[in-house]
Image (cartoon, rainbow, N blue to C red):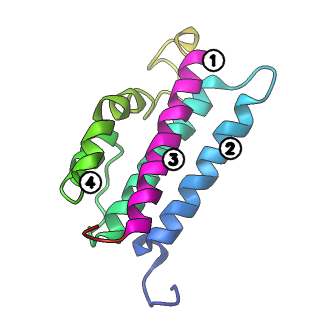
């Protein structure tokens, strides 16, 4: 239990901490001479998902099991319309929900540096948006 008596899964701070860790690992991996591009994309998707869930939980949302970035962004729009601007970019990350996890879903060669950099960039944008919105507080 956390200091407020809530389980960590119900605590926005924990979601943001895990999201940040996923994103930092993805960013770090990109610095290698031969990065694991599939893993970078998978981690970027995972980070974005966790940032969005952290935001939603902070709004009082009850956790739902979904990995769909577009669906999560749609739920965020219910609290702040600015999240609608991220829908198109979020759809890109949905391609990587399983792509970094299982062979055969996307060809290995179809994900390279460009895709990995784009995925990380989108996750960074989602992070920045979530942190900005949370800093402003509800209704601001």
Residue 140 part of the magenta-drawn span: no
Answer few, some or many: residues within 10 Å of disc 3's Cα (few below 14, many 20 plus, some between 14 and 19): many
Magenta span covers which residues?
114-136
Does 58 sit above or below residue 33?
Answer: below
Which residue carries the number 3 mark? Answer: 47
Q: Are marks 2 and 3 in contact (CB under 8 Å)?
A: no
Q: Position of residue 134 (x, y in %)?
A: 41, 65
Q: Residue at x 51, y 12 (%)?
A: 107
Of mark 1 and mark 3, the one earlier in the sequence is: 3
Which residue carries the number 1 mark? Answer: 113
Task: State how far apart marks 4 and 1 are (Cα).
Answer: 30 Å
Of mark 4 and mark 3, the one earlier in the sequence is: 3
Magenta highlight: main SS: helix
Task: State how far apart marks 2 and 3 are (Cα).
Answer: 10 Å
Q: Determine whether the residue tagged by mark 3 lies in a helix, strand or loop.
A: helix
Of mark 2 and mark 4, the one earlier in the sequence is: 2
């Amino acid at each position: 239990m956390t200091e407020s008596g809530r389980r960590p899964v119900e605590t926005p701070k924990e979601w943001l901490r895990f999201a940040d860790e996923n994103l930092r690992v993805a960013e770090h991996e990109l610095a290698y001479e031969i990065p694991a591009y599939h893993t970078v994309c998978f981690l970027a998707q995972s980070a974005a998902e966790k940032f969005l869930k952290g935001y939603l939980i902070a709004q009082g949302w009850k956790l739902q099991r979904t990995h769909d970035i577009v669906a999560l962004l749609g739920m965020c729009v219910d609290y702040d319309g600015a999240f609608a601007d991220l829908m198109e970019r979020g759809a890109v990350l949905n391609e990587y929900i399983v792509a970094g996890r299982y062979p055969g879903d996307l060809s290995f060669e179809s994900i390279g540096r460009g895709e990995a950099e784009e995925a990380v960039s989108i996750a960074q944008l989602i992070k920045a948006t979530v942190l900005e919105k949370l800093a402003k507080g509800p209704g601001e």
